[in-house]
Every structure is written in structure tokens, then in C-alpha cells.
Image: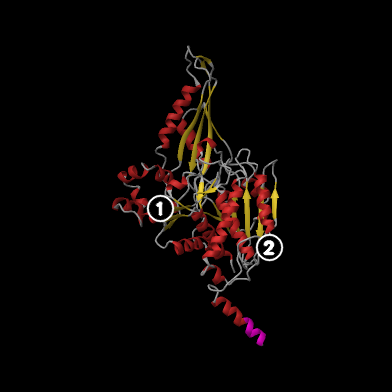
Amino acid sequence: MRRFTSVVLSILVAVACAGRRQAPPLAGPSSAPVMETPARVALIAAPRGDAEWNALSDEAAALLSQYLRINTTNPPGNEIVAARWLAAVLQREGIEAQIFEPAPGKANLYARLTGDGSARPLILLNHMDVVLASPEYWTVNPFSGVIKDGFVWGRGALDMKGEGIAQLMTLLILKRARVPLKRDIIFLATADEEIGAGVGAAWFVEHHADLIRGAEFLLNEGGMTRANGRGGVDYYGVGTTEKSPFWLDMTVRGTAGHGSRPTPDNPVHRLVRALNRIADWGGRTPLVVTPAVERYFRDLATVERDSTQRRWFADIRAALRDSVAVRSLTGDIAYNALLRNTISITGLKGSDKTNVIPPLATAALDVRLLPGQEPAEFLAELVRIAGDTAVTFRPQGPSWPATESPTETELFRAILAAAQARHPDALVTTPMLAGFTDSHYFRRMGIASYGISPFPLTQADSRGVHGNDERVSLEALRFGVRFYYDIVARVAAR
Ligand SMILES: [Zn+2]
């Protein structure tokens, strides 16, 4: 009896003093002392001291610096080196990781923290590969991982090794603090995001769907946290949906000949005429308001200063019945991409020689479809517009209809709460991505997937993504590690 009372008492004391109690540090290698099981309230409502979070963010910076030194430029990617490094970091903490090698030098890494199974798993998805960096345009070696002037520099700092490290730190903190979990947390680091298909997420869901089956949620890149440059954040964009790429090769065959004697079925002429019709139609494909886009404009209306724009945003469907509004809205390339299927003609090829009529002329079309649009239906329409039986279209790869993740979920609410706790005045909304990430593989499995950016970035900071001097500030990293942990703890801690 007495024993029971004292246990209850000490729990109560622990909860009551959670904010003030001196606990062993969470930072450091796994040999460091591990704090006793913290109360949920201590983890979420009253996070531990700033000093401890600073130490964790220093650790994140050191890990990111090491990670950036591993050159995973894709192609070839060589992600196996990154996967082995991640596995070693996880193993040091007592977390076993599995590495899958779908092809020589390629790898996907999978690790799992187990919960009590009362809720379904959450996947933290990140890609290990990066795009090409041209050192001559950089002020530092893009693979030096150097920390200077308050930044960690290197290709992948933002896209997306930095976010990968925020996810990794979340896993390490949960493990070190022995946070009781209600759901499993799956850490999934993949190859081949930057080249579209390949043997990354696509390969993983095809060959190892069993390892993630039943997952309820996923966090990935594809969001945006906009810093206002005055130390605050104005805007949190959470990715709930993205357009679906439907890239096409277009071919016309005809009769080859000498350029000095024009032929009636010169395939280049026919291609150009068909492309002309397609380019024209591309500017007037039907305007479609998807639920996510309608919500996004409504959210924008709450912060829009211009009264006309505000009225249009507040009821975008009504605005699109007004020709003045349509001209203005579709004149903005970002809004235009949210409101219709788009076509960009990006490639053209005829003859290599000026005086030779080729037997074949080709073009490449970058088509992006809104959620709810069927690729096959769009293709049928395109064939009709091209209006020439000599023209054939061939999809460059597999296509899929874009899908949306709902916002009425525990994870979305957690993201919202974590953002609002930090910046109560910021707009938290769901912009549709005109590009795409690997999230679609998981959305199609019924897993609610959200794109978030843990790092507050100004417009200038974002230019490093696929650009030069990609870097993340130590301040953004400090923010991001805690922000990511906070979101995950809210939905996973028991
Ligand atoms: Zn990326």
C-alpha cells in the first residue's frame, strides 16, 4: 500500500515538476545517460530546456555536415554509402536498420521504432540522392559539409538531407528518452527521387509494401515554411496534394528528302502545325477548382490586402465566372498552374542537317495534371487537338492520377498546432505543389501524406534548392529539429 502510494506520488511529482526537473541530457551518443521515461506533458506542452535543445541542434549540424560530405549526386546516386552511414548512426543508438540494394551502388534504408500498436504507423520519408552541383558556381566545395558564417553548406542541405537529419534526430530523441509510443515510427531513406523513377520509393513500395502496410501517416518534403526575414514566420505551407506529371514524346513520320525539293509530308512541318494547335490549347484548357485549391485560395483571402483579390480568393469558383478575374488570375503563372492541366512544349528535334528533310520529327511535352484528372482521358483530348493522324504520342513513363490527403486527420492537426504554437499569426495552409515528390506512391496506398519544411526560409534562402550555394542556417536547423520532433511526438507519444 505504501509502496503504491509512493509510486503514485512520485509520478505526480514528476509530472508536476517536469518543466523544472534536472534531467540527464538527451544529446550525445547512446552511451550517455538516458533520461527516465518522461511524461507526455513534459515532452509536448513543456519541452525541456533550451540548453538541451541547443545541444541537440549542434548534434544535428554535425550529423548534417557529415551527411553532406557523402556525394550522392544522381546519376549515379551511389546512395549505398549514405545508407551505410545512416545505418551506423542508427546502430550506435541501438536502432537496427535494414539496407536494401536493388542495384549496384543503389540503396534504400528502412528502420523502425516500435510502439504499442494502439495506433497505426507513421513513416518519415526522405531521399538520400541530390542533384548535380557545379563547383565553379559555388563559394564553397558543395561536398565539404563546411559550417561557416552560421550555415551548414552543401548540396542537399535543403533538398533534402537537412530534413532527413531532422527526421533522424526525431528518431534518436524518441529512442534516447524512451518515449512510450502508441504507433510505430518508420524511417525510410530512399534513392532516386531526383531522377523520377528508378529504384527508390517506387521500387520500395513495389517490393516491400509489406514493411509499410497499414501505415496511417507519412511526412515528406514538399512543404514550405516562409521566414519573413525579421526573425518570424509568416506562412506555413503543408503539402497535401501535388499535380501528376504526364510527360509525353510526340512523333511524326514522313518522307525523307533533300531540303531543296520540299515534300508535302515533311514531318517537321506537320509537327510544327500540330504543336501550334497544342500550344494554343495549352493556354485555354478548362479551369478546374479542386477542393485543396479552393481551400488554399480561401486561406489566402484572409491575409490578402488588395480588396479585389481578396474577394476573388474568398470565392474562387465565382471569380472564375468573371472574365476580368480569369485574365488576372491566370496571368499569374503560379495561380494558373493550380487551376488547370498545363502543357509546356520543352523539346524539339528534326534533322541534324539543314539540307535534309528527316523521316522523323519529335517533340517532348511536359504535361501536369490536376488531382482527379485521368491521364488516358487527357491523352485522348490531346490527340483530337493535334488533329493529324501522322502524329503519335507516347508516355515517357508510368502515369497516375494525382490524389489528395485529407486535412481532417490527427497528423494534420498536429502540424497545425505545432506551427500555431510557434507563430500564432502565421497563415497555415495547403498549397498544391505544381511539381511532385515521392509522396504519390504512398498516397495511392491510402497513407495520408504531408509535405512539410522544418526550416523557415526566406525567398532568397530557397534559391539554393537545385541552385548554387545551397545551405541551411544553424538557426533554421535549431528550429527545425524541435519543430519536427514536436509534430511527431504529438501524434506518436502515448
Ligand atoms: Zn527533394
* Residue 5 belongs to the span the image colors magenta: yes
Residue behind mark 1: 229
Secondary structure at badge 1 equals loop
Is disc 1 surrounded by few (<14), some (14 to 19) or many (20+) residues within 10 Å? few
Q: Residue at x 40, y 33 (%)?
A: 280
Q: Is residue 149 above or below residue 253?
A: below
Residue at figure coordinates x 53%, y 73% from the top left: 20
According to the picture, the residue beneath numbered tag 2 turns out to be 31
Q: Is residue 373 above or below residue 120?
A: above
Judge the density around disc 2: few (<14), some (14-19), many (≥20) Cα neighbours within 10 Å: few
Label 2 C-beta lies within 8 Å of the nearest ligand 1 atom: no
Location of the C terminus by quadrant is bottom right
Q: Is residue 211 above or below residue 101?
A: below
Going 61% across and 69% down the picture, which residue do you hit?
24
What is the quadrant of residue 219 in the picture?
bottom right
Residue 209 percent across, percent down from the top left: 66, 52
Is most of the magenta stretch helix, strand or loop?
helix
Mark nearer the N terminus (1 vs 2): 2
Residue 121 showing in the rendered view = no
- Judge whether 35 appears above or below 108 on screen: below
Question: Could you tell me residue 450's position as x and y percent?
Answer: 52, 55
Question: Magenta residues?
Answer: 2-7
Asked whether residue 74 appears in the rendered view, the answer is: yes
Q: Nearer the viewer, residue 484 or 321?
A: 484
Q: Nearer the viewer, residue 29 or 232?
A: 29
Q: Can you name the residue that lies furthest to the bottom here? A: 1
